[in-house]
Amino acid sequence: MKQQKFAKEFMTEIVQHKGITIANTLIAIDKEGRFCLNDLHRAAGAESRHQPAFFFRRPEIQELEAELNSAPVQSLPTITSQGRNGGTYVCKELVYAYAMWISPKFHLEVIRTFDAVVTGQAPAAPKPSAISPAKEFRAIFGIARLIGLDKNAAAISANQGTAALTGVNMLQLMERTHLATPSQEIYYTPTELGSRFVKSARAFNQLLVEAGLQESIAGHWVPTEKGRAHAFVADTGKAHGSGTPIQQVKWRDSVLAEVAL
């Protein structure tokens, strides 16, 4: 009985908050109290390797779903909906499982955020703005351009600001979460390139340093003059943070010849 009362109180708090905010990202809920896993993916950093589809392919997750489906619950533990507010919505147990799959740090952040909601310590979800999300986006985008951000960085900033004020992710609605780069070539992170040769990102970054292709400046990897012919600097939102635009160095396949791989 105590467990049922706790669960009821928990969902009441979540509904009153119109969702739950994790890593400065509003996690939407459906009318059955399930949480949007797509929003959680963005809160975790939106890395390709952490896509919900990969999560559901894991045998232990399929077993967990089977257990949840066999339990006497009032709604399905997982459901996928289409349309403007579509996405994959999951029960709280699968939220915890997904967070644990991402990393111990993110798992702990999710647990503490959920606990804070129940104890009344979590901040309320942002109140809807009186201005439409589209107008908010345009206004913030204009300010971002005025202070010198390029178009990609300005769009990311405008999207984060609009989501914070209205709870609406404009880039997601337009299915443009990845912005087009000036060049249509495919670039790879050191992690992706290193994985081809059973090397870690750290080891591959060291190879780039030894080949004179990059150097570390103020804790950031920066392509050297030699490396610029193979590198591309992309604008993205910072993982596990506020989404503040940062720059990430990616590399063409041509760099492999320079590091003798």
Image (cartoon, rainbow, N blue to C red):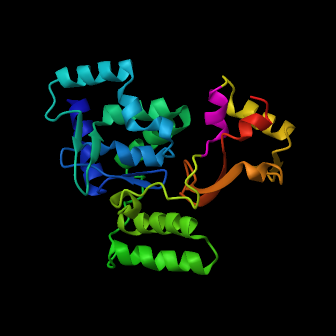
Above or below, 129 relative to 124: below
- Is the magenta region chiefly helix, strand or loop? helix
- Residue in the foreground of this view, choosing between 70 and 206: 206
Above or below, 163 relative to 195: below
Residue 32, horizontal then vertical, whole percent: 18, 44
Can residue 193 be found in the magenta stretch?
A: yes
Image quadrant in which the N terminus is located: top left
Span shown in magenta: 187-196
- Residue in the foreground of this view, choosing between 212 and 137: 212
Image quadrant in which the C terminus is located: top right
Q: Which residue is drawn at 55% across and 54% down?
A: 184
Can residue 195 be found in the magenta stretch?
A: yes
Q: Is residue 203 left or right of residue 239?
A: right
Residue 47, horizontal then vertical, whole percent: 51, 42
Residue 201, horizontal then vertical, whole percent: 69, 34
Residue 222, can we see it?
Answer: no
